[in-house]
Amino acid sequence: MNFSEIKEINSLGRNIFSIRFNALEEAMPGQFLMIWVPGIKEVPMSISSMDNGFEITFKVYGEATKKLSEMNVGDRIFYRGPYGKPYPEPVGKTAYVAGGTGLASLKPLINKHGGDVYIGARTKDELFLLDSNFHISTDDGSMGFQGNVVDLFLSIGKVYDTIYVCGPEIMMKNFYDRAGRKYGKNVYFSLERLMKCGIGICDSCSINGFRVCRDGPVFSYDEISMMDEFGVKRRTESGKIELMIKR
């Protein structure tokens, strides 16, 4: 377990925060940290910046992330990692398709290589880390294209050599079903699943035998094609498998 002093904390949108801290470790785009919140639990966090230390960007969704959002400059943040398989280097014309806080994982790759960015959220207040040339969609039409980010991507109709997708699993399944086959091996997905250890021991993040923490979180189109649980089933804290969409 490592710890560092928080250098900067910012509110970026509705219940969305970033924390920047010094780190001696090196990371690659797509890798993640296990952040320990004393007295609560550890949570996996994408690294949204690797310049001048690490930055994590997250949405408050539970007790641990709420506690993180209430921390102050000078407080200690505890972490393990970085862990996981990074994004492969892009080849040719590149697109990034992000839903919700999925942009946090993609941002280091975007900053390094550039390309076309498609970002979607439920409403404009949940958008963050935006650039003027991003293609933007909101479910309620409060900013940019009205609809989801997959609809936006398909409506523009550009052709790409490499595509990276990160966001809610239902959104990524939507992209896989509607656009994945067209691009095949050139599409990479970053999955987020319940993680407890982050190093491949507890199996809580398993999906069809793949451990998201060790075998991912970045998976190729071919690997995703072997996962019939993708976008359909997930594990609860107790390990029970449940449907993502209730019938």
Image: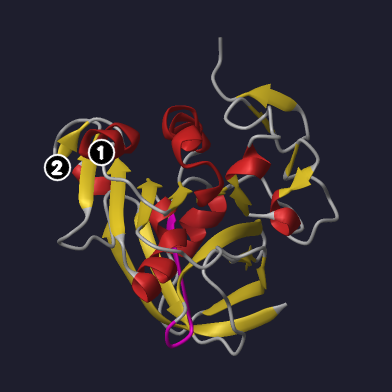
Q: Residues within 10 Å of mark 2 (few under 14, many from 20)?
A: some
Residue at 64%, 35% in the rendered image: 225
Q: Which residue is labeled 1 in the image?
A: 157
Amino acid at circle 1: Gly
Q: Position of residue 209 (x, y in %)?
A: 81, 40
Residue 188 seen in this snapshot: no
- Give left or right: position of 152 versus 88: left
Residue 103 within the magenta-colored segment of the rendering: no
Query: In the rendered structure, which segment of residues is drawn in magenta?
Result: 51-58
Q: What is the x, y in percent for residue 107?
A: 39, 65
Q: Disc 1 vs disc 2: which is toward the camera?
A: 1
Give the x, y percent position of residue 201: 85, 55
Q: Residues within 10 Å of mark 1 (few under 14, many from 20)?
A: few
Mark number displayed over residue 174: none
Which corner quadrant holds the N terminus?
Answer: bottom right
Q: Residue at x 58, y 47 (%)?
A: 191
Can you give x and y, in whole percent of width and height, for residue 137 in the image?
A: 23, 40
Residue 109 in sight: yes
Residue labelled with disc 2? 143
